[in-house]
Image (cartoon, rainbow, N blue to C red):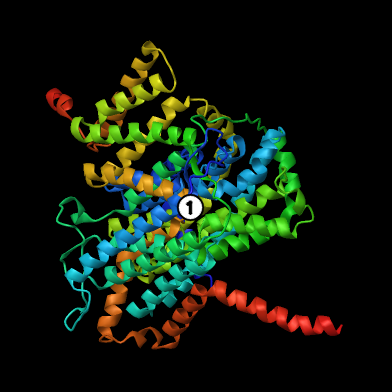
């Protein structure tokens, strides 16, 4: 598995496409195997009362997935093409992580302290870090958004969204 | 013969009320916005709004949701032309010639051409739908579990045979979808499956979460690689430009007819708007006399994909309403909506819910006319939205996706799953694994499995039930042909060249 650096990104590659292809295909094989084992334990054969048992369908589905991904792995390993271009360049990966990590933190925060405060922090974070806005421009937007969403969803549509201790303290 | 016509008139009666027209308008505007914004699209927009419609009258709700669909079909091309960012997967082909036209200052022409061709494609498809749907519905009354399973089989085999990606990847993606559909409660035995002892998986994976994650978050992550900004061209669109472009369009009537045909075919035999747009573009490029200039800003290069995409998107409703088989991911979401509301798509829908079905079909005509008018007049509005800085609009889109995921069943774990699907969507898109088969498998998996089990139960385990009568046998046979099509096509090609060689040598 070579680590190619000939991507369109001048800052150099992080991992080659072939590595990622094999990794994803292997991951699918593992998922397939896990499902096959779980379905087998559930009963993947034939019962005269209900026909195919509960695990029958998932077992064969997972088996096909296992074989198909196995074929992809073989295809990738046997491929004789030139060193594959990079799957993602370093700066590209940086961009993706710059969004993915804040999103993950936002989701985790939402579960614990509710969506409204998390939303404010999330939008505020992006505006400061990426947009480089001064705090006096960030604050009104970051506060207005949750309030607007609150009015639309909680009061107007009557659809409850995740709330945290602050909202409970306010009586919602 | 005229029966559909009268039903359609009844449908118009249902639609032309103030409240239904109001919701139609709202839906279209919202749909255009969603189609236009990258990262949110028709499928996730409908998915996000679906839980909010639970308290609405079903007919009104489907009119609004379908209007979002039409709006999104129109909206996708606006950002494709102005910003080179396809707002929807089916607008990708529109960027090829659309953005160069914008760069040459001819954005107004490009927009008019694409929006009008979309309208024509959709209109023709709707007429086809009006007259074909009742026929297919009546025919589908004869379907039993083996027949239904064979139709699902045909759907999925078509994906494998006609897909342009590696068949192993298509199969793997599809099977992953089926496996995800199996998680949760087994519909037939009532027992739990694949929950691995956790409570969160008892309800399984909802296709809505999958769609929002795969097509929403996943799309944003892919777009982000190109940089954390959206840049675009301005568009001057005025009645003069519109009129001049309309005068040019009849020249491309062949392209329009061909695009509509491709679209109707790929919408009905599930393929969807995206493959339809690419195929139409490819065919137009091959058969046009200006084919080699495609990609530099040819009006025809915009007409072709847009006509096909819209007629496919519209005709995708045909199998959805009559057989319960969505012809595209967005139709899949609409189908999911029907199921959640307790309506069974299929032949009985046409019999028992005439208001609903014909109200919907009538709203398609209106939606297209109103949509075209609205979209042509509001282009500058959409363009100015993109001037909202990325650092504000991107988190907002993500927040909306999160809200959409949560409101389905008030389960915080769904938001986590959304991010998970987002990462899967990102990886799959980069590695050329198709997402549509996975989504369709998640939506249809339960029903496909049920038909399979019921069919086998009825035949006491005999697999030949799928060849037991001419109807089931021919559909199953067709599935096998579709499944192995690439091999068959290659064989035919080899035979043809072998037959041609001796003749060539002798001549």
Quadrant of the drawing holding the C terminus of chain A: top left
| Front-most of residues B373 and A54 | A54
Q: Position of residue A160 (x, y in %)?
A: 22, 37
Q: Residue furthest front?
A: A2
Q: Residue at x 40, y 76 (%)?
A: B150
Left or right: B265, with A109 as reference point:
right
Q: Quadrant of residue B339?
A: bottom left
Q: Residue shown at 24%/38% (left/top)?
A: A159
Residue B11 screen position, x and y as percent: 45, 58
Query: How many numbered circles are shown?
Result: 1
Say which quarter of the image contains residue B122.
bottom right
Q: Specify the subunit that label 1 lies on.
A: A
- Residue B148 visible to the viewer: yes
Q: Position of residue B59 (x, y in %)?
A: 36, 53
Q: Is residue B346 left or right of residue B299?
A: left
Q: Secondary structure at mark 1?
A: helix
Residue B186 x %, y %: 21, 66
Q: Nearer the viewer, residue A155 or B468?
A: B468
Q: Foreground residue, B414 or B300? A: B414
| Residue that protrudes farthest toward the right in the picture | B507
Q: Residue at x 46, y 27 (%)?
A: B390
> Label 1 neighbourhood size at 10 Å, few (<14), some (14-19), many (20+)?
many
Q: Is residue B141 visible?
A: no
**Which residue is tagged 1?**
A18
Up/down of B137 relative to B500, above or below: above
Where is B465 relative to B44, above or below?
below
């Amino acid at each position: 598995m070579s680590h190619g650096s000939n991507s369109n990104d001048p800052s150099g590659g992080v991992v080659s496409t072939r590595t990622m292809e094999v990794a994803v295909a292997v991951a699918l094989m593992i998922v397939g195997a896990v499902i096959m084992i779980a379905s087998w334990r559930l009963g993947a054969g034939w019962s005269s009362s209900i026909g195919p048992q509960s695990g029958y369908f998932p077992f064969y589905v997972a088996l096909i997935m296992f074989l198909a991904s196995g074929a992809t792995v073989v295809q990738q390993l046997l491929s004789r093409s030139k060193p594959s271009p990079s799957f993602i360049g370093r700066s590209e990966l940086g961009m993706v992580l710059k969004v993915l990590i804040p999103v993950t933190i936002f989701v985790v925060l939402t579960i614990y302290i509710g969506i409204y405060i998390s939303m404010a922090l999330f939008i505020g974070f992006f505006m400061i870090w990426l947009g480089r806005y001064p705090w006096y421009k960030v604050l009104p937007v970051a506060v207005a958004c949750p309030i607007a969403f609150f009015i639309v969803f909680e009061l107007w549509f009557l659809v409850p969204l995740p709330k945290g201790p602050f909202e409970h303290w306010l009586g919602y | 013969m005229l029966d559909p016509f009268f039903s359609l008139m009844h449908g118009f009666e249902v639609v032309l009320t103030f409240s239904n027209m109001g919701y139609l308008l709202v839906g279209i505007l919202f749909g255009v916005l969603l189609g236009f914004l990258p990262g949110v699209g028709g499928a996730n927009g409908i998915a996000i709004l679906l839980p909010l419609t639970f308290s609405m009258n079903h007919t009104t709700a489907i009119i609004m949701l379908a209007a979002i669909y039409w709006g999104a079909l129109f909206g996708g091309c606006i950002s494709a032309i102005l910003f080179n960012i396809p707002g929807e997967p089916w607008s990708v082909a529109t960027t090829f010639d659309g953005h160069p036209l914008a760069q040459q200052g001819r954005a107004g022409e490009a927009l008019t051409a694409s929006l009008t061709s979309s309208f024509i494609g959709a209109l023709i498809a709707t007429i086809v739908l009006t007259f074909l749907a009742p026929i297919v519905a009546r025919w589908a009354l004869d379907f039993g579990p083996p027949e239904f399973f064979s139709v699902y089989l045909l759907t999925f085999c078509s994906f494998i045979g006609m897909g342009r990606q590696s068949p192993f990847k298509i199969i793997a993606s599809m099977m992953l979808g089926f496996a995800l559909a199996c998680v949760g409660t087994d519909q037939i035995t009532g027992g739990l499956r694949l929950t691995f002892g956790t409570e969160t998986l008892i309800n399984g994976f909802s296709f809505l979460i999958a769609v929002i994650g795969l097509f929403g978050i996943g799309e944003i992550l892919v777009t982000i690689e190109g940089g954390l900004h959206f840049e675009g061209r301005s568009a001057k669109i005025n009645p003069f430009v519109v009129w001049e472009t309309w005068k040019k369009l009849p020249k491309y009537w062949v392209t329009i007819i061909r695009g509509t045909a491709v679209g109707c075919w790929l919408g009905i035999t599930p393929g969807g708007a995206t493959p339809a747009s690419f195929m139409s573009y490819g065919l137009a490029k091959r058969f046009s006399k200006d084919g080699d200039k495609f990609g530099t800003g040819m009006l025809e290069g915009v007409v072709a994909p847009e006509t096909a995409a819209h007629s496919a998107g519209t005709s995708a409703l045909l199998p959805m309403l009559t057989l319960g088989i969505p012809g595209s991911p967005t139709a899949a979401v609409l189908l999911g909506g029907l199921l959640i509301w307790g309506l069974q798509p299929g032949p009985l829908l046409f019999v028992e819910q005439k208001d609903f079905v014909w109200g919907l079909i009538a709203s398609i005509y209106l939606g297209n006319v109103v949509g075209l008018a609205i979209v042509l007049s509001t282009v500058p509005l959409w363009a100015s939205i993109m001037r909202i800085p990325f650092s504000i609009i991107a988190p907002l889109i993500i927040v909306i996706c999160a809200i959409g995921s949560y409101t389905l069943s008030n389960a915080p774990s769904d938001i986590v799953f959304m991010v998970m699907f987002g990462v899967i969507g990102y990886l799959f898109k980069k590695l050329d694994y198709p997402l549509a088969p996975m989504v369709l498998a998640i939506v249809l998996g339960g029903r496909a499995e049920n038909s399979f089990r019921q069919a086998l139960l009825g035949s006491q385990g005999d697999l030949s039930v799928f060849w037991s009568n001419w109807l089931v046998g021919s559909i199953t046979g067709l599935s096998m042909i579709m499944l192995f099509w690439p091999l068959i096509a290659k064989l035919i090609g080899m035979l043809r060249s072998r037959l041609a060689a001796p003749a060539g040598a002798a001549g």
